[in-house]
Amino acid sequence: MSTNEDAAIDAVAQILRGQAGITDWQHDLYRTFHQHPELSNQEVKTAERVAQELTQAGYEVTEKIGTTGVVGVLANGDGPVVLMRADMDALPVQEDTGLDYASTATAEDAEGTTVPVAHACGHDVHVACLLGAARLLAEAKGAWSGTFVALFQPAEEDATGAREMVEDGLAETIPAPDVAFAQHVLAFPAGRVSPHPGPFLSSADSMRITVHGRGAHGSMPQLSVDPVVLASAIVMRLQTVVSREVAPDDFAVVTIGRISGGSKSNIIADRAVLELNIRTFDTAVSDRVIEAIKRIATAEAQASGAPAEPDFELFDHYPLTENDADTTARLTEAFTAHFGEAVEDRGRQSASEDFSDIPTALGVPYSYWGIGGIDPDTYAAAQTKGTVDADIPANHSPQFAPVLEPTLSTGTATIVVAALVWLAPEAHAD
Amino acid sequence: MSTNEDAAIDAVAQILRGQAGITDWQHDLYRTFHQHPELSNQEVKTAERVAQELTQAGYEVTEKIGTTGVVGVLANGDGPVVLMRADMDALPVQEDTGLDYASTATAEDAEGTTVPVAHACGHDVHVACLLGAARLLAEAKGAWSGTFVALFQPAEEDATGAREMVEDGLAETIPAPDVAFAQHVLAFPAGRVSPHPGPFLSSADSMRITVHGRGAHGSMPQLSVDPVVLASAIVMRLQTVVSREVAPDDFAVVTIGRISGGSKSNIIADRAVLELNIRTFDTAVSDRVIEAIKRIATAEAQASGAPAEPDFELFDHYPLTENDADTTARLTEAFTAHFGEAVEDRGRQSASEDFSDIPTALGVPYSYWGIGGIDPDTYAAAQTKGTVDADIPANHSPQFAPVLEPTLSTGTATIVVAALVWLAPEAHAD
Amino acid sequence: MSTNEDAAIDAVAQILRGQAGITDWQHDLYRTFHQHPELSNQEVKTAERVAQELTQAGYEVTEKIGTTGVVGVLANGDGPVVLMRADMDALPVQEDTGLDYASTATAEDAEGTTVPVAHACGHDVHVACLLGAARLLAEAKGAWSGTFVALFQPAEEDATGAREMVEDGLAETIPAPDVAFAQHVLAFPAGRVSPHPGPFLSSADSMRITVHGRGAHGSMPQLSVDPVVLASAIVMRLQTVVSREVAPDDFAVVTIGRISGGSKSNIIADRAVLELNIRTFDTAVSDRVIEAIKRIATAEAQASGAPAEPDFELFDHYPLTENDADTTARLTEAFTAHFGEAVEDRGRQSASEDFSDIPTALGVPYSYWGIGGIDPDTYAAAQTKGTVDADIPANHSPQFAPVLEPTLSTGTATIVVAALVWLAPEAHAD
Amino acid sequence: MSTNEDAAIDAVAQILRGQAGITDWQHDLYRTFHQHPELSNQEVKTAERVAQELTQAGYEVTEKIGTTGVVGVLANGDGPVVLMRADMDALPVQEDTGLDYASTATAEDAEGTTVPVAHACGHDVHVACLLGAARLLAEAKGAWSGTFVALFQPAEEDATGAREMVEDGLAETIPAPDVAFAQHVLAFPAGRVSPHPGPFLSSADSMRITVHGRGAHGSMPQLSVDPVVLASAIVMRLQTVVSREVAPDDFAVVTIGRISGGSKSNIIADRAVLELNIRTFDTAVSDRVIEAIKRIATAEAQASGAPAEPDFELFDHYPLTENDADTTARLTEAFTAHFGEAVEDRGRQSASEDFSDIPTALGVPYSYWGIGGIDPDTYAAAQTKGTVDADIPANHSPQFAPVLEPTLSTGTATIVVAALVWLAPEAHAD
């Protein structure tokens, strides 16, 4: 281990000495965010609180970049510029965790429907950890030098927030970073950290298929083209895209997240809607899958004798998240020095993210890592029973509920450790 | 033809002489109802207008029987009591007729969702015709004697309105009828009338099936039990109930009018809902169908490895509408005497109605007939092309649009003709 | 009751007095036919035995009309000519009745495949009854006058035998009949008889659909177009023809009797075959159904990305069997006079027959009736338990097993009774 | 490059100088095998010819090891023992290549059905190459020393041949090998070679599912439990095993290679059979898949109201083929030295093999590689058009047709090159 690394370890230790002092504040913050989730591009109160906390910690704050985005910049002398990003939005999910701080919030979604809202994806963890790390760095400015940029992004869940911040002038708002980071809480034991070089998160596309039938009274099917049967036939047939058309060695997911047709048991409606999500690690596979979906839906409409072809609308495109090998190697070394055996490359994840739109636009290398959020004892028990998949609710589940600790303290420390690889006094020579 | 019948014909002619004078008023009424449809049990403005018109015509009016039900009684000397019923409620359908008086209304449905509302079932025709006939009878009291009861029922579309009026004291509100009638506008040529003895409208049941899956991130299907796939598999399998389990000579309809699962393309939800409608003319068939549906949905949940069995909820039960043979024979004779070849028994209908709950509760014979609502030339053209099913929108279709005439004048005259079979001066001896 | 009818009853009684004397012979005959079933157009031994028995009874016999058809003519003085037909062929079914005279026969079918053969449709009953009646009539020639034609038809099961007999010169072989009859043993209590005027048996068409995929190694689905998945998708989608496209008041059956694709678990084949059977009582419905089937199969091939459209081949067309009203009325009266309450019109049957090709070609009225074949006690027990459908194996089931008595004696007597309506001495005046 | 390697290269060159002299003989051999394919465990004539050729070349030959297996041993002084295996059996496939030496053979399969037979998997290539290499090695004994074992295995296609040879005393028949090889012709350009370390071929299991329905006449579906619909529903539902239950990063294939139900369009049969093939690279995945298949088939039988649960029968188990890393590295180096850029690791293959049962039983390291069989120009043209998957028939396709050259000469050379890594005079020191 080099002197530089020793210096970074010392500096990290010095900064993290402040953790004990911010625990109550951070837990309160987390519970507040958790209990008051906001949908994509509606993160108004979350952003206000974020800006207020950053300002209080001494950051120079810019608000409302790309709807509700917030950036805090802490310039602390010479040295590299490190950007850390957290996403702020929640999901239209009815929380079912039984927590005393569970969300009961509702909101109007983009189509004007009132929906439940919950932090079922754990973005509240990301926000609380980044605010914690930002505060610790501000409170120990003597231990490092350079510039730390804390970026809070809206609308990750519909893949628009990162791009909107870029398009709204992010590059002119912050100093040019040397490196960019992001992290995500995942369904593995809290306290653990998972860095991974290369492709880490899949690309994703969403597709809305509207099928057209012919409405009729529910008692006269012979006068109708039944859109519920048509939509269901498409769902069943779409299973063959992954099972028969994609090579078994290629990664592909086709999820139909939403189906909706008709309003009443005794009326045959004249249309139905499917909303699909497509994940791959390879554009050729993605193209083949999208083509197959269109072929199947079009043919099923013909099988039904539908009066019109289906409408296809692609939306929520997520880029591939491909971690820079060198950056990730340096992070992995630093994480391992700090966390020891808790660091393990758990492999690429099937989820997707729009984070990479930011470093790609800014032209900087990036790395994105996972942190655990599940109570270690609970996880170990499920592992012993072989019931991890069944018993441990994962992200987006109504039961997804990260334990406060060691999730928050670990997620906070990872940011400090990662930042200090670049910002430790002796690291600048690298 | 007997003297009685001649007398009835004369009386009818005398009353219907008033039709020319009420046409503008009736058309205005109809357009107003059509443009301002109200959902089941929300027929407040419709009921107010009905009550106002009946009062103005000289009827003794009782309001708010079973939520919004209205009854007008015109006692006109000795003689039988004839009850005619019209239903007032509209449907959660987005009208797509292109009419200049098309509905753009919306309302909150029973679950608090804002939905479009339209008279896609033609109840506005029923109300306008009954108000017209009520006025004509009031304006020609010299031509008949007895009592005419004009009953305006709420909530036919959820099968509760008739029963609610009965339970809210209908029997105590009106004189005991000798006979009860109802009619429905259907997708055959306007100007035509279709009486039918015996079973005329099917019994119907609705069933809500809630299937339980396990929610997960859209990219991790292996952690989920996908409720959209489960619901779709049930839809496809339910087709076999009619195609394989019901004898081909037995009448049965299983329509899945509504399917709903998930809220977002990239989240696998933890449940989905199907709403079914079941029609038969035979309780044994109905029992077998319901049992088969439960068996299939339960087994499909097992095929999915679902964490819980589906929930089944029966609702909106409609009784069989079985026209009294003798009453219908008398009506058919009178209709034929008046309308000539325009009268034809077009057979039983697959639709359902709760009307019969009223005469059944009151212990009186009843008959329910159909009147045409489609422009005769349009219908004839479609018939020539063999495209009636494809080109003529039927009840509950967003494009269902009865022509004003001869629909309204015919629907009005049928009531007068029917009533006079009992109320013509010489008819009382029967 | 007229004198004629009394005379007929006397004559019937006189003829049937012979039944006791032929029982052993008839039971032996039946068991022999049952144990040695022959496929369509392979009824060589059956026909030989039939010809031998007819000859022995004094009939003038012609063999090999339309492959293996046999006709016996007994001219017995002046009077009408009555034709009674029995069909001789068996089915490629593995008998599973447990009877000590069960068939263990196999044969090569038309495609050269070795298949099991069994009288799972009961044609052995028809042959044994007609031979019995033919003998009784021959033994009591004094009780009647006219001509009795006993016709034994091949290949009813593939709808070709009747037409082939006609085309092979049947009209030139036999005297012109005045009336023609046929009967079928069905899954209702033995001893009972079911005549029915008007449409009695459905029209039927068979269709072979060959779908084309692309073969590949079983481990490389992405290189294939999987014909097993394609065929299965078609099967599931075809259920919607009856459940959604045919009016619930119209009779239609779409059965996929055979599916066959692939030869080995680990090879994806390049084609699969479906064999369908379509039943209706109405050509318009039949046309709509066939069109829908083609539309669905074609579209499903497109959904699979199939390299070619499916091939469609119609075969085994069965005409509608529509009983002459007057003839049936006379039969019903005579059956009721003889069998009393055992006669009941059990309604039209969904099965099909090519028998009517014969009277249609000959220009004579006809009637076709059903006789019961199930042990009355077994049937009654199932009825009490409400398990008739589950417990009573019907025609074409591997477990279908008519009881010898009273099936054979009743089926024999029906023929005598029917014939005597025309052939009783006093009946000629009619 | 070491002296040893140079020596091996010299020795290889010396041996392969004989290739020109055996080309006509080898092409004749190949065409003969191709035109006279034999099913698994019926490779009698193939084995006879193999034994005859080996004997003629000077090998000590043992026949009928495990039904039709043949081993030839050529002891040539001191040195390692190298075993090379070829499989001899063909498939029940109707060849559709249009070649003038295409197979028109038929045979009785294990169930007594007459089926077409073809070398659709290319085992004829394997046999011809190994006989060629065996002859070349025998003709140039001065160029190497040690022992070469040429093993010809029956019944690879049903996964039994390797095990049967082991159980029939293979270890006692041949000297203990130091290393074992096998190769397979695949659908990539002829002339190319693809070695791969680690897991190379998947494990595979076949499963027969017999579903039980209730037979009935085709016109009476209500009396039946339709096994064709049941089997088809299972096929559609099984697609969800791979699409929803297996993690998208895990390899799994579920192919239903055979479906068979019913014998006639108008009979509803009482059972249907599915034959599945399951491929994975991981026992845990395989277990999960098999469990899911059973769960789905059992539940679908319940959905149909089937009278009995399905029967499940596992057969044709293939082990994982996992190439020894060190052995494969040495082969790859030698192949590259000889073939240059034609050598490329094309990754693991989804196919399966029972070859590894032999080295596993003998306790020796092994490596299995692929050789191309497609005309390079044809392949390049398809690649340019992006239609490789559609245009290039793969193994088990009726159109699979390796080009004679450079397929046979390359496949022959690979064996010599591989053997000489161990058997070149200077290689023994390794």
Image (tube, coloured by chain):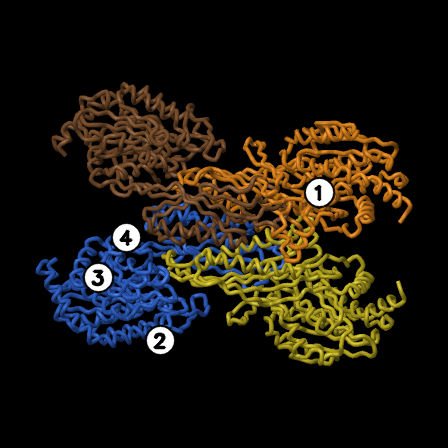
Chain colours: A brown, B orange, C yellow, D blue
Where is mark 2, residue-wise? D100
Closest to the observer: B67 or A6?
A: B67
Question: Which residue type carries mark 2?
Answer: Asp
Q: Nearer the viewer, mark 1 or mark 3?
A: 1
User: For the residues tagged 4 and 2, is the chain the same?
Assistant: yes
Whether residue D385 appears in this view of the structure is yes
The chain carrying label 1 is B
Give the percent coordinates (x, y) of residue C270.
43, 63
Query: What crowding class fits label 2: few (fewer than 14 Cα within 10 Å), some (14-19), or many (20 or more)?
Result: few
| Left or right of C290 on screen, residue D387 | left
Provide the residue designation for mark 3.
D342
Residue at image position (86%, 37%) is B144
- Name the front one of labels 3 and 4: 3
**Do pointers 1 and 2 mark residues of a single chain?**
no
Task: Say which of marks 1 and 4 sits in front.
Answer: 1
In the rendered structure, which amino acid carries the disc numbered 4?
A: Pro
In screen coordinates, is A391 left or right of B311?
Answer: left
Please state if A106 lies on the left or on the right of B430 as rendered.
left
Whole-Å distance between the Cαs marked 1 and 3?
A: 80 Å
Q: How far apart, in angstroms, are the residues tagged by discs 4 and 2? A: 38 Å
User: Mark 1 — residue?
Assistant: B184
**Chain on which label 3 sits:** D
Q: Residues within 10 Å of mark 4 (few under 14, many from 20)?
A: some
Inspect the image, locate mark 1, and give the three-letter code of the amino acid beneath it.
His
Q: Is residue D97 above or below residue B92?
A: below
Q: Position of residue D104 (x, y in %)?
A: 40, 74
Give whichever of discs 3 and 4 has the lower sequence position.
4
Mark 3 and mark 2: Cα distance apart in space: 29 Å
Q: Secondary structure at mark 1?
A: strand
Q: Which amino acid type is shown beneath numbered disc 3? A: Ala
